[in-house]
Amino acid sequence: MMKFLTFRGGVHPHGYKEATADIKIEKADEPSVVYIPLQQHIGAPCKPLVKVGDRVTVGERIGEPQGFVSAAVHSSVSGTVKAINMIPNAPGGEVQAIVIESDGLNEVHSSIKPIGDFESLSSEEIINAIKEAGIVGMGGATFPTHVKLSIPPDKKVDTFILNGAECEPYLTSDHRLMLESPEDIVYGLRAMMKATNVETGYIGIEDNKPDAIKSMEKAAEKYPNIKVVSLKTKYPQGSEKQLIYSCTGREVPSGALPADAGAVVNNVATAAQVAKTLKTGMPLVERITTVTGSAIANPKNLSIKIGVPIKEIIEQCGGYSKTPGKIIMGGPMMGFAQHSDDVVIAKGASGILVFDEKEARIPKPEQCMRCGKCVEICPANLQPLKISAYSLKNMMEHAEKHRALDCIECGSCSFICPSKRPLLHSMRVAKRSIIAKKRKQSN
Amino acid sequence: MEGKLFVSSSPHIRDENTIQKVMLDVLIALLPATIGALYYFRTNGAKVILLTVLTAVVSELIFQKVTKRPVTINDLSAVVTGLLLALNLPASSPWWLPVLGAVIAIIIVKQFFGGIGHNFMNPALAARIMLMISYSGHMTSWVKPGPDAISGATPLSFIKGATEVPGNAPSLTDLLFGNIGGSLGETSAILLILGGIYLIYRGVISWEIPTVFIGTVAAITLVFGQFDIYYTIYHLLAGGLMIGAIYMATDYASAPVTPRGRIYFALGCGIITSIIRLFGGYPEGVGFSILLMNIAAPLIDKYTSPRVFGEVK
């Protein structure tokens, strides 16, 4: 189905996807040591299940989730636990990690066996398999997938959307996956639709990837209840609320969840992982990551084991071609800048982006000239210039009145601003401050 | 690893647009009208343009040096203000009139209130109105195009108090191409519209303000002139409507930022312009209407916040 669907607002950053869009997914080299973070998801960190000196195997659970919103962590290699210590965390700060020295054998854990065809499984069994496999949103949000699929009984969900928009510039990992494993994606989607008891499925893909649209259409042609939707290429087309609107015309009410608009959204990579887990029993221990940017010698799409330091991955891509100025985990619009290349590949690592020193510099902000561009493009219909001004003056009540909490942090305002104002940055400050104050009041 | 990494919060890329590029686009848009002014008014026109632009830039430089603020003359906004002011002055101006106007525009209206983005009125327009009230003799001795500077009445004065265009008024073709009396930039409607189309195409201004402003004046004069199309077109092409609606009312700092607010703002400009032209003491009301609506802009903004995505009312 070729229909150009879209949402209001948004920006058109240059794609920069040429470097890796046509490069096949390659397996990264076997690591000698992996550092597996015990928190790679939104929610509570895991407790270690192993101690130093233990032998572990591929797919073995080494981190026990704490509470419902949490996701189990598994070993990606076979070998010996060398240490359990703190390592730099990609979204900031530090995270506890299990350091495993690989024996190079990749012995698979005895519990790993096919779970079975989803058609013979119940809804609970599918969700449980996803939970056991520690699957999280692999587009970068890392929200535990079993939580997303456990729809509260009072909500009526009738639409399942797979996000193949890949609206972030530079990234091509989902694009390649849609070309190389479209059947897995459709299988995962059908399994998750069964798990949530949903009849209608959409796969939303930006129209700058016609080959991926074709590939997915072919894989889904047998299933009339699954529609491949061609979306207008515009950032943030892959943002959950915008994607739901583009596909269904429904708005997620302010402050509510997608389920309140009758929809569940998951990434195509998550769907492929669900298929892999059901077919082989293997938990989430490996993912596809785009390694690119002006300072990477040979940009690639790599299938990388969880816990491999990005330094090693960059070396496999020919190393730095120029002095690196900025390393970003994820895409350039929403990714996290790193202070070293010691961080490791985690479940949400859709990209490793390395800029040279020139690109790394953010231009100096100048006075706001009130051009209103940020108001025109804000996908949430906010007035970033005002919220930002209130935030900078520490007038948080006013920022809240201008609905700072509805900001989806897509960064389109900071991107478009001719005066290079730190609009999103200051709105984040306002959001954190408002939320902190609310917590205080409710305590 | 060697070197230091730059760490900042997302987004990590920025659009290539800058204040300077926006202002450059405005200057490009004003180029046809400026060339038109030079063609019609020769050295008199050139003198006024040079004086205002130079004074505007130098005033900004001196003010920012004296107050120890970052010097921002490179962003070209002072050049734009200077040029817009020039296009609002008669070619017969004595040398001190453009100089005084530029000083008022830049220092009093723009810099006293905080510089770019903080002026609550359009600087060039505020300066024009101040000169108009203080030196109405100089400011209303409009000269007819040509090197000889023969003074004459502006096209609008022909229809003051009339509901139809008198026979001795300038022809529509002359209005369209600028072969009429008036300030440097209010002469040729077509050159101004050309620049306006460029600005909308480049995304520098949105269509709302010029279209609604001009549309409102058209609607009101059409009714007032008892559906005499000629009378309406005369109103649209004569005077400062084109330069006002396209270049002055669209000033970022002094117009609302919300799309709906811009429509109300332009509607207000159109209504006030028409009332002054049809019933007021002055033949022209574009300048006053924009300044009055500039003052109302923050209020309009306040009541026209767009509905937030997902907002339940």
Image (spheres, rainbow, N blue to C red):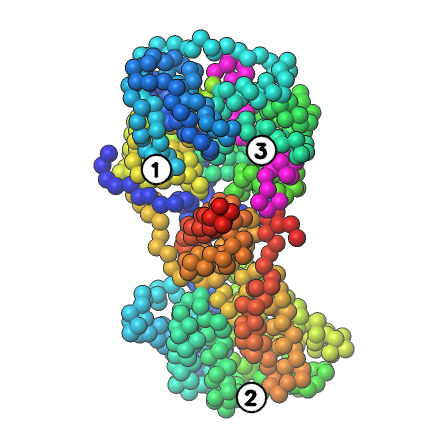
Upstream in sequence: badge 1 or badge 3:
1
Can marks 3 and 2 be said to lie on one chain?
no
Instruction: Report, in whole angstroms, how far the alpha carbon at label 1 lies from the one at label 2.
Output: 75 Å
Check disc 1: other Cα within 10 Å, few if <14, some if 14-19, many if 20+: few
Tell whether A80 sits left or right of A390. Answer: left
Residue A201 placement (x, y as % from top left):
64, 29
Q: Which mark is residue A265?
A: 3
Q: Nearer the viewer, mark 1 or mark 2?
A: 1
Residue sitting at the far front: A443
Name the residue rendered at 46%, 27% in the picture: A66
Residue, disc 1: A93
Residue A330 placement (x, y as % from top left):
42, 35
Q: Nearer the viewer, mark 1 or mark 3?
A: 1
Q: Which mark is residue B152?
A: 2
Question: Label 2 lies in what chain?
Answer: B
Within the magenta stretch, is there residue A277? yes
Name the residue rendered at 70%, 85% in the picture: B162
Residue A236 vs A62, above or below: the answer is: below
Can marks 1 and 2 be said to lie on one chain?
no
Residue sitting at the far right: B226
Residue A437 placement (x, y as % from top left):
47, 50
Residue A224 vs B222, above or below: the answer is: above
Tell whether A45 sits left or right of A244. Answer: left
Tell whether A37 sits left or right of A131. Answer: left
Check disc 2: other Cα within 10 Å, few if <14, some if 14-19, many if 20+: some
